[in-house]
Image: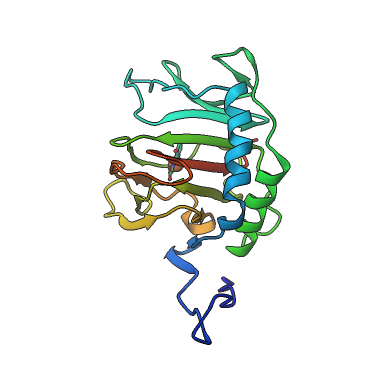
């Protein structure tokens, strides 16, 4: 079952009862502000990861340059090029293995998955996505992973964005959900192969990330 975090913030003696868990669909939730105490530590870790495996704009099989800049950490990384989508243990830009998944990242993803009802999540891949104003992600399914029993855990940092969460068919009308700094979306089970995407990022400034949205997507790929 999905648990609400107990109200911890007090104002005028009243507990904050705003929902911390928003249900997107069967087995799909947004955990509001779940990251918030760890945001600066995550950003510091990211600086190191991106020094070892720089952000790049990948190309789809059809030859389109993706508007989102990407990198990875973990045992394998998600890549796309003229031969299609796959998980690869080697970063094609550096010809070296991707940097390891930091323990702190693993713990955050595992905690979020457990809170959404998926115990013992053990991610082996983390896709790092950086959105600048105008960048978007069209509706797609995450289906390059071997094992669909594990959920997808998606951490949002920086500028807010409209997340689109659809059904099992590409033309099911997606639900629109604002994702803000510190929110973590988790989808698995009945929703594991739901179509999802991100509307074009609106310009703005965020104190932690500047003019960007950063998304970390944890998966069990192998
Ligand atoms: C997001 N990203 O940025 C959701 N999926 O909130 C994704 O769904 C995604 O960024 C597959 C590959 C890259 C992605
Ligand atoms: Fe995705």
Q: Quadrant of residue 50?
A: top right
Q: Position of residue 165 (x, y in %)?
A: 37, 53
Q: Residue at x 61, y 49 (%)?
A: 150
Q: Is residue 84 above or below residue 175?
A: above
Residue 123 or residue 55, whichever sits in front = 55
Q: What quarter of the picture does the N terminus occupy?
A: bottom right
Q: Residue at x 42, y 22 (%)?
A: 58
Q: Position of residue 113 (x, y in %)?
A: 61, 57
> Can the viewer see residue 221 in this picture?
no
Q: Ligand 1: which quarter?
A: top left
> Can the viewer see residue 203 in this picture?
yes
Q: Residue at x 48, y 42 (%)?
A: 215
Taking the image as shown, residue 137 lies to the left or right of residue 96, namely left
Residue 96 or residue 9, whichever sits in front = 9
Taking the image as shown, residue 156 lies to the left or right of residue 199, namely right
Q: Is residue 174 above or below residue 90?
A: below
Q: Quadrant of residue 202?
A: top left
Taking the image as shown, residue 125 lies to the left or right of residue 132, namely right
Q: Position of residue 21 (x, y in %)?
A: 49, 68
Q: Is residue 160 above or below residue 119?
A: above
Q: How many marks?
A: 0
Q: What quarter of the picture does the C terminus occupy?
A: top right
Q: Position of residue 96 (x, y in %)?
A: 65, 15
Colour scheme shown: rainbow
């Amino acid at each position: 079952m999905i648990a609400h975090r107990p109200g911890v913030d007090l104002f005028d003696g009243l507990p904050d009862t705003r929902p911390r868990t928003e249900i997107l669909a069967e087995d799909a939730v947004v955990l509001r502000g779940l990251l918030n105490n760890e945001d600066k530590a995550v950003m510091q870790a990211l600086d190191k990861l991106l020094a070892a495996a720089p952000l790049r704009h990948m190309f789809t099989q059809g030859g389109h340059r993706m508007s989102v800049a990407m990198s990875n950490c973990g045992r394998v990384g998600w890549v796309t090029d003229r031969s299609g989508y796959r998980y690869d243990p080697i970063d094609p830009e550096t010809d070296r293995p991707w940097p390891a998944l930091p323990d702190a990242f693993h713990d955050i993803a595992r905690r979020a998955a457990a809170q959404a009802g998926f115990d013992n999540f053990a991610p082996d891949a983390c896709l790092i996505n950086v959105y600048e104003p105008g960048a978007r992600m069209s509706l797609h399914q995450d289906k390059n992973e071997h094992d669909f029993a594990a959920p997808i855990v998606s951490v949002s940092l920086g500028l807010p964005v409209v997340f689109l969460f659809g059904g099992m068919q590409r033309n099911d009308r997606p639900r629109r959900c604002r994702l803000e700094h510190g929110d973590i979306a988790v989808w698995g089970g009945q929703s594991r192969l739901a179509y999802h995407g991100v509307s074009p990022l609106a310009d703005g400034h965020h104190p932690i990330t500047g003019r960007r949205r950063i998304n970390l997507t944890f998966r069990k790929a192998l």
